[in-house]
Structure formats: C-alpha cells, structure tokens
Amino acid sequence: ARAIEEATDGTYKYGFVTDIEAGSAPPGLNEDTVRFISAKKNEPEWLLDRRLEAFRHWQTMNEPKWAFVDYPPIDYQDAYYFAAPKSPDDAPQSLDDVDPKLLETYEKLGIPLAERAMLAGVAVDAVFDSVSVATTFKAKLEEAGVIFCPMSEAVRDHPDLVQKYLGSVVPTGDNFFATLNDAVFSDGTFVYVPKNTSCPMELSTYFRINAANTGQFER
C-alpha cells in the first residue's frame, strides 16, 4: 500500500506536459471533425470514405457497460480529436526538424530518439498527440525488406498494403471503440514484414498525450 501511495501521490517526475507550440482541431465530434483529420493528413478519398462510413456506423452503436469498471459518462463532444506540435513544415523530415523540447521529453522517459543513443537492436516510432515525430532505424530495416514507418507515411507511400491489411484483424464495426478509432485515428505505426523475412531488430512504438482534453486514437 505504501508503494502505491508513493507512486500515485505527488508530482509526476517526468512531467505531464511539454511546453511547445501546438495546433488542434475544434472540440467536438461530427463529420466535419472526421474530414478535418483526413485533410490534415492529406489522405486519399478512399480513406476519407472509410472514416465517414465508420463514423456513421459508430453513431448507431451503444457504448458498452463494463461489469467491474466504474467511470463517469464520457462526453464525446467535450474533447479534441486532433492535436499536433507545430514545426517549420508541420511535419518533421528528420530529427533535426523536431522541436528540441520534444526530444528532451523522450530522453527523460528513457526513450532517446537519436539513433546514436538508441539501445542496440531496438527501433522506435514515437507518436506525440496526433502525429509521429520520429522513427528510428528506418533505413536499416528497409535494407532487410521491413517497412516500419508512421501510419500517415504508409498511406502515402504504400497505399496498396494499407488498403489490404487495414482493419483485417479488427474490422470496422467490431465494437464501439474500435469503430470510433476507425473514424478518427490520426496516426500510428505501420509495420510490414514480408513472408520469409527476418526482422533484424525489435520494433517498439511509444504514444504520448500532451495536449489537455485530447483523445489519442492511433493505429
């Protein structure tokens, strides 16, 4: 009991918030929210159509009632569904473009994003609020035939693979929260290891929510 109290009382030593400039969607959830996220990600029409179909189906569903979990009702209109740290191009092209405060945050958490400082044999995709801010060892993995990248990048560069496998394990409509995720996911990590291919290192993804009142929905 003492250990639990020590862990939950006081200030979180790593900090709950990183003080950086960020932009977000207007609060609330409707079709305009879904279109906003899709436009921010520069997505093709087929993916927007998939999102809208999921959102319309979600509106017909009921939130599950868990037997042993008690929490206040969730107001899905009182949240932000997209938030992203601002950068010179609104999308870092390399670690040099990433806000230093973001890099410091991951360093404090023991997740260094500079490849020279990474633990040997571990690749990381770091997602901050609604965007991936860095993916390590992509080139090394590509040499082995493995694709490891942000979901938004996979949609752009590997659309056929995304269309083939997206939702193939948990399909749209499977459950209330999966359907909501299908409608408003903003990024995530894409991994493709071809048949008869050995991945040369461990793969890891790290998600951090920084903006207040923001829902993080990733794939």
Image: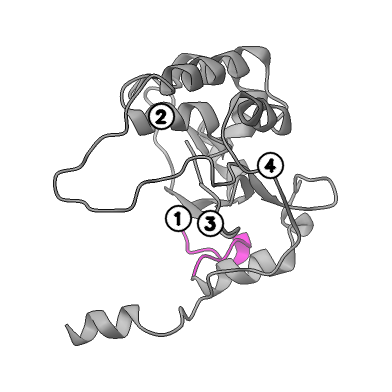
- Asked if the magenta segment contains residue 60, the reply would be no
- Specify start and end residues of the magenta stretch as a single range: 110-122
Q: How far from the left and from the top, in percent, is residue 142? A: 57, 35
Q: Residue at x 85, y 51 (%)?
A: 88
Secondary structure, mark 1, is loop
Secondary structure, mark 3, is loop
Q: Nearer the viewer, residue 158 or 13?
A: 13
Quarter of the image with the N terminus in it: bottom left
Q: How far from the left and from the top, in percent, is residue 83? A: 65, 48
Secondary structure, mark 4, is loop
Q: Residue at x 33, y 23 (%)?
A: 169
Separation of residues labelled 4 and 2 (CA atoms):
40 Å
Q: Earlier in the sequence, mark 2 or mark 1?
A: 1
Q: Which residue is mark 1?
A: 121
Residue 193 horizontal side relative to residue 23, left or right: left
The amino acid on which the numbered mark 1 sits, given as a three-letter code, is Gly
Q: Which mark is residue 25?
A: 4
Separation of residues labelled 2 and 1 (CA atoms):
16 Å
Q: Which residue is mark 2?
A: 197
The amino acid on which the numbered mark 3 sits, given as a three-letter code, is Ile
- Which tag is nearer the camera, tag 3 or tag 4? 4
- Which tag is nearer the camera, tag 1 or tag 3? 3
Q: Could you say which quadrant of the image residue 41 lies in?
A: top right
Secondary structure, mark 2, is loop
Q: Earlier in the sequence, mark 1 or mark 3?
A: 1
Q: Earlier in the sequence, mark 1 or mark 4?
A: 4
Q: Which residue is mark 3?
A: 209
Res 192 visible: no
